[in-house]
Amino acid sequence: MKTVICLSTDKAAYPVNAMGTSKAMMEKVIVAKSRTVNSNKTKICCTRYGNVMGSRGSVIPLWIDQIRNGQPITLTEPSMTRFIMSLDEAIDLVLFAFENGATGDILVQKAPACTINTLAEAICELFGGNNENIKKIGIRHGEKMYETLLTNEESANAIDMGDFYRIPSDKRDLNYNKYFVDGDTERDLITEFNSNNTELLDVEQVKTKLLSLEFIRELISK
């Protein structure tokens, strides 16, 4: 069987910018395609994850450069939270999707998160920066205070698979009469999965996670 795994992002949940909207549209196309694709020949599913530490666009290399150049670390809002994961963990999610996903699924990893301030303090301690030299510059347009991996609406049908959530595609027909009659009494008890209500790491835990990255260990040794 052929398998296609598409890579999405937490920004696709409740998108507020072009990147999130484009990723959300990709997810919708995958779910729509699941209604017509021959699942015996091709499996198409999607992974959705948060920030990969040290990837392109990551703030971590910027902060390290600022410390080494004697500049203050600049952060937008200290209490802002973000999911954090390593590249290996992102790959684990893709492999899990290959093995356990079905056509139309969105697979989400139960990633931990931290505040931006906690991440900045961890970087300071690892690279000799001064925690008192952290400069708040304010939230930029299009930024969220927290990110969402599983929306409130998706939570209604999400399947808990241990370290992951599986969101099966909604293949119900357009006959709504039975939903008006039957309803779903459990629906209101379920909430979204976001970077505020997941496990929040402290400075020491974030340092441990950073030290698991080869590029961080290499930079420290230089």
Image (tube, rainbow, N blue to C red):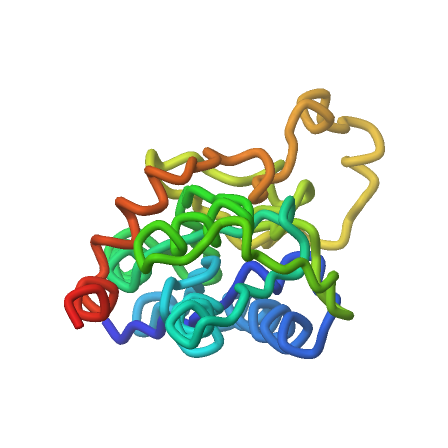
Above or below, 189 against 197 in this view is: above
Q: Position of residue 222 (x, y in %)?
A: 17, 72
**Residue, x 15% and y 66% (percent of image)?**
221
**Residue, x 41% and y 45% (percent of image)?**
111
Q: Position of residue 21 (x, y in %)?
A: 68, 73
Query: How many discs appear?
Result: 0
Q: Is residue 199 visible?
A: yes
Asked whether 176 or 25 is in front, the reply is 25
Asked whether 191 or 129 is in front, the reply is 129
**Residue, x 53% and y 64% (percent of image)?**
73
Left or right: residue 108 versus residue 190 is left
Asked whether 148 or 58 is in front, the reply is 58
Q: Is residue 97 visible?
A: no
Asked whether 102 or 193 is in front, the reply is 193
Q: Which picture quadrant has residue 60?
A: bottom left
Left or right: residue 47 versus residue 193 is left
Quarter of the image with the N terminus is bottom left
Q: Which picture quadrant has residue 76?
A: bottom right
Q: Position of residue 41 (x, y in %)?
A: 30, 73
Q: Position of residue 77 (x, y in %)?
A: 67, 54
**Residue, x 54% and y 50% (percent of image)?**
132
Left or right: residue 122 versus residue 80 is left
